[in-house]
Structures are given as structure tokens and as C-alpha cells.
Amino acid sequence: MSSNVNTIRDLAEREYKWGFITDIEEERVPKGLNEDIIRLISGKKQEPEFMLQWRLKAYRHWASLEEAQAEPKWANVKFPPINYQGITYYSAPKRKPSLKSLDELDPEILRTYEKLGIPLAEQQLLAGVAVDAVFDSVSVATTFKEKLAEAGVIFCSFSEAVQKYPELVQKYLGSVVPYTDNFFATLNSAVFSDGSFVYVPKGVRCPMELSTYFRINAAETGQFERTLIVAEEGAYVSYLEGCTAPIRDENQLHAAVVELVALDNAQIKYSTVQNWYPGDKEGRGGIYNFVTKRGKCAGVNSKISWTQVETGSAITWKYPSCILQGDNSVGEFYSVALTNHYQQADTGTKMIHIGKNTRSTAVSKGISAGHGQNTYRGLVKIMKGSTGARNYTQCDSLLIGDKCGAHTFPYIEVRNSTARMEHEASTSKIGEDQLFYLRQRGLKAEDAVSMIVNGFCKRVFRELPMEFAVEAQKLLSVSLEGSVG
Amino acid sequence: MSLLEIKNLHVKVESHEILKGINLTVNSGELHSIMGPNGSGKSTLAQVLARRENYLVTAGEILYDGKDLLSLKPEEAAAEGIFMAFQYPVEIPGITNVYFLRSALNAVRKHRALEEMDAMDFLPMFREKMKLLEMDEKLMNRSVNEGFSGGEKKRNEILQMAVLEPKLAILDETDSGLDIDALKIVAKGVNALRSVERSMIVVTHYQRLLNYIVPDFVHVLVNGRIVRSGGPELALELEEKGYVDAERQALAV
């Protein structure tokens, strides 16, 4: 019994390996938020007028929400009030971020990404993955641009897209997540600093995986990135994102927005491995990951698939969703969320069926250890005109130890009687029985826990691109690693 | 020479004493059967030998292959060649039978300073052992014990034993829940694995299993003590007269 307890304790006390701080000079705007700050951010980025106006509209709306104390309160998470005037909304490495080549990048930043296992020098990259690296508020490098350009694919930082492709940005920005959507999305719309932009033209299958690596480095800053992916008719793209942050005692806010648009017969596959700093074992520090992610299957036969592995952040508040507008369109959500020590996660999906014969699948695997609290919250909504819609939801929780919690809030709204809905749910505990069985066969306690957890998550890992699946498994194993005494 | 020596073993679960001074010696190659009524402590003995940790040993010692068995963790005991076929095999969703067994075998091999076995070498051996237990190859790629019938689970236990090649195998009520055909297959598998280098302890409630797996020695465990020991004929006598009689006789001695 004692070493089972040890395994669970080790799991709860594992160290965060990505917690180092990069010492670079930063350029930041003063703390706090007002119209001048918005103008300052927009000015620094030399944005066109429409962008500034959009930000200002968002800011004014947010200010009214804040005054009305309309910060969402419904999630099953607890945290002290956030002082929005105590946050720095823009921080950038001092060297100029618009680079001709990687040689101009601050070597400290290059080293940071190397330490994180994300080499930015193209010859060192895994074949077939192009990377955009976002450091604090700005994108510092995007690789394989030329090769992608040959195929007609645009993959660049959001700032660059605003400069070079303003008509595309203006057309799609806010088309899935309007600036009025919710408190955090509104805040993001006002202050977002960078992010990735992807445009895949008609009939093009993007020749490589696209990947963005987000890193928060500066203290007392928020990271507010915005990602927009547009797949034109018949296009296909697979996009991956990864995230880490240094260990800091104070909580840091990360409020991102991701919008996906899939036109007729287009497919977007979006995968996330989120490993923001989760806080220490007493629950001090860590990232507040308050993110709005939504995709619109605007065209017929289009498909959007979200896969997420959420192991980091003090609090995760995130519901990657699909609006299934086109007839026969397909939405998918596959999720693994691990909460450890005092981490809290309230995550799930919304599947909004509008078109005919639309289908959606949601598979959620929640793992709670230590004092972690893990909530699945899902909405499946079948609109009146959505004839022949189908949904399958599976939502499983795994508990490790006896101080953690798993919670499930599935909402189902059906307004069309032809809909077919399936919902399966289970809660299990890594039992002493299971551990003893594996150990009796010769596996060490920590390997046994790792094997059980990986088996539990298999259905989701199967959806990840190969390199990511390996990374995700390793990440879980690291989380479960410890020196069993 | 003796592989296992249990001396005056006393074991508590919570505050309740279950084993009250067990003495038992098992030599290499021998098959011992432990029989007894429900609640006599048979399974406790099996689990203590496999090093399950929620039992408190209050007195006595166990020497296994010259080592202090009670100082080993379950995985260490397994690596040293102790295998237990579970009465209630556990399900491991998402992990295939073949992956699980290869991981287990390699963990054990690593401990014994042997090279890891890759899939190319492992699979033919695994298939061979499956044949021995007349198991459907489809079960190879199914999750461990998930959706297996009672008989398939028990056969899977013996399959694992065949792959892991233990020095001491403990079969905990392997016959429970088996129909006669499945029982015969399991017994055939067990008999094929008997060897001069492998000792077995077969824990059972009924004599039936011992028609197919013939023991060298039979011990009767009642109320935490071995009250009688003898040859295979003792099992038959028990079947006829029951455990109460055996206990009465033991007390009378």
C-alpha cells in the first residue's frame, strides 16, 4: 500500500521542467488598460485603421462588461478576483521582431526554444512541420515560409497578416468569435498582440503540419494571442500548438482566441498540447488559461476536428467548439485533461448543429490527481432545421488518489425530432487492484500508473499527429514520473 | 533444495488475524495444493507471497530462493520469478494484451540483466503460447481482460505465466467460474508448464481441479492454520468428508 501512496504523492509533486526564465531585454507598455494603451499597441504594430477601430469597439464593450462585473462566473473553478489594471498588456523582446532570417533573432530566444525542444533553425526541424514561435506578445520566427508559399499557403504571424493581407483579416476576423462573444474574448479582441494566421487556398492540401509554439516569458504580463485559420473550398490543413511558461509565484493571465473557418469540402485539424506552468504543489502561481476556441464549418461536407491534451495551467477554462452550418458537415472534439495538485480545469465543447445531416463526436478523458478538480462541460445543440443530425459523446473520468474531484455537466438541447444522440459517461479510480496486478507482473509502480493512464487516453492520442502523440504520451509519463521510494 | 520456506507466518488484515502461524516448505519442481473452506486464509497466503501490501505480517518469515521475501516489493518479487494467477484478473482498458505482456516480460528481463525482447522475437513465442491455451489470436490485440469471458480471463492468466516463466507460480482459485471444458484447457496449460525448475502452489476450494492437476502434496488450511498435510489422496478424502471433519481430526491430534 505504502508505495502506491508514494506513487500518487510523487505524481502530485513532480517538477515542472519548462519553468526557466529567459533573460532578455523587453519592451513593454505601461501596466493597465485604457484607450491609450489600445492605441499604443495598435501603433506599435503599425496597424491599419480598421484594426484600431475594431480594437477600440472591443475595448469599450469590455469596459462596460467589467463595470457590470460580467466576468463569467458559471465555471466550476475558484480564483481570487483578477486585477485587470495590474497586468501589462504588451511585452516584446527588444530586438526588432520583423526579421529577414533567423540569424537576426536574439540568440537567447533561439536558445530558449532549443531548450524547450523546439529548434527554429530549419535544417534541424522535423521534416514536415513548419513552426511559428510566439514569445510573450510577438511572433519571433516562422519557418518554412517559402516552401509553403510555393503551395499557395499563407502561414505567418498575425501582425504580418494584418500588414500584408488586411482584406483577408478584415473578412474573417471576428466572423466566428465576435468581439462581443464573452468577457475574455472581448478582452482579447481589444489587446491581442500576435498569434498565427493560416490561409489555405482552394483545393490545396497543406504540404506539411503547421505548428505554433507559445511561450510566456515576461513577468506580470498577460498573453493574448489570436489565431485565425481559413481553409478555402476543398483545402486541408493540420495545425498544432504547444505552450509553456516559466515558474512564477503570481498568476498570469492567458486569454487567447482561435477562430477556424472551413468552407465547402474543407478540413481543419487542430491539435493542442497545453503545458503552461500549472503552479506549485501548494497551488501558488500558474497560468489562468481562459481561452475561446471555435470553428465554423461554413461549407457543405466540411470538417473541423479539435484534439487537445491539457496538462498545464493553474486554471483551464476552454471549450473548443464547432458550428456545423454546412449540410453534412462534421465536428469532432477529443480531449485529455489532467489536473494535478491544485489545478482546476473546466473544459469541454459545444457542438451547434445547424445544417442537415451534420454529425459530431465528443470524447473527453479527464484525469484528476492530488487535489485537482476536473470538470467536463459540454453542450450539444440541434437547431430546428438540422434534420438527421447525430451526436456521440463519451466522457470518462479517472481519479488518482482520494483528494481530487471529477465533475460532468453535459447539456443537450434538441429542437428537431430526427436527431440521434448518444451519451456515455464513466468514472473510475486507479485502484489498488489494478496497480497490484501490473506490479505483480513486474512493472514498477510509476510505470503501472503511467500505463493505466495512457490506456485510458488512447482513444484521444490516436487522433494526434504522430510526433505530437509521442510528445503527449511523454508529457503524461513525465507527469506521472517520480522516484518511488 | 527448498525454493520457498514459510516459517511461523502470522498475518493481520486491519486488526483481524487471518494467518496464525503457517509453516510450509516447497522444493523446486514440487506442486503443492492448499485447500480449505471459505475464509480460512488461503487467498491471504497467496497474496502475501505475491507481496500485496495491505497485509500486516506480525510474526514469522518467508525465505524465497534464499532471500527475505517480505522485504521485496511486488514488482521485485515478480522479477525474482514469483507469479500469481489472480482469482479476479483485472481489466486494463486501452492497453493491448500483447503490449502489456511484452512490457511485463521486458521489465522482468531488465531486472535479470537480460536484453529486451523486440516485437519480432516476442510475437512468434507469444503465438506459440496462445496455441497451448487454445486462445483465439484476436485476444492478442484486445485490451487486457476487457470484455473477456470468465474462462478467457483465466486462460489469459495461464498464458501470462507461460510467457513470464516463473520459478514459483501461485494459482489462486484458478478453477472458480470455469466450466469443465475450460477447466481441462487450463489444466492442460498448467501441466505443460510443470517442470523440475518450477514450483507451484495451487489454491483451491474444490477437489475437482486436482483431478486434472495432480499435486505432490495437499495441505488443509482451516482458520489460519495448516491442520493436515498429505499426498493427493487427502484431497479425495476431503471431498468425501468435508473440511469440518478434517479440522476436528486435527484438533483431536
Image: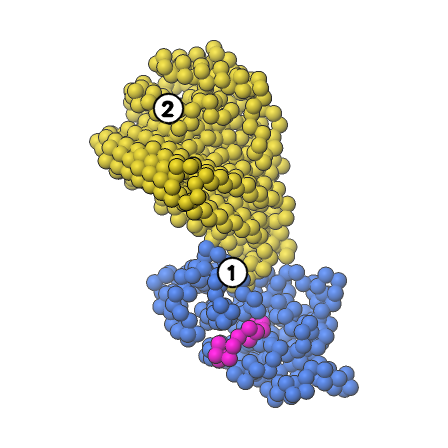
Q: Which residues are magenta?
A: B170-184
* The residue positioned farthest toward the right in the image shown: B252
> What secondary structure is marked by label 2?
loop
Residue A404 image-quadrant placement? top right
Name which quarter of the figure residue A214 lies in.
Answer: top left
Q: Position of residue A237 (x, y in %)?
A: 31, 37
Disc 2 residue type?
Answer: Leu
Q: Are marks 2 and 1 in contact (CB under 8 Å)?
A: no
Q: Colour of chain A?
A: yellow
Q: Which shade is chain B? A: blue
Q: Position of residue B120 (x, y in %)?
A: 34, 63
Which numbered disc covers residue A173?
Answer: 2
Q: At 51% across and 54% down in the image, what residue appears?
A: A452
Residue type, label 1: Glu
When the figure is inspected, residue A347 is found, relative to residue A440, above or below; the finding is above
Q: Chain of mark 1?
A: B
Q: Is residue A452 visible?
A: yes
Its colouring scheme is: by chain
Determine whether A137 is above or below A458 in the image.
above
Instruction: Please state the horizontal and vertical placement of residue B110, each as a whole percent of the image.
Output: 46, 60
**Residue A308 in sight from this viewpoint:** no
Point out residue A304 in the picture as x, y percentages from the top left corner: 36, 38
The structure residue drawn at horizontal position 60% and vertical position 30%, both measured from the top left corner, is A79
Secondary-structure class at tag 1? loop
Q: Nearer the viewer, residue A425 or A240?
A: A425
Left or right for A161, reference B104: left
The answer to whether B250 appears left or right of A439 in the picture is right
Disc 1: which residue? B91
Q: Quadrant of the C terminus of chain B?
A: bottom right
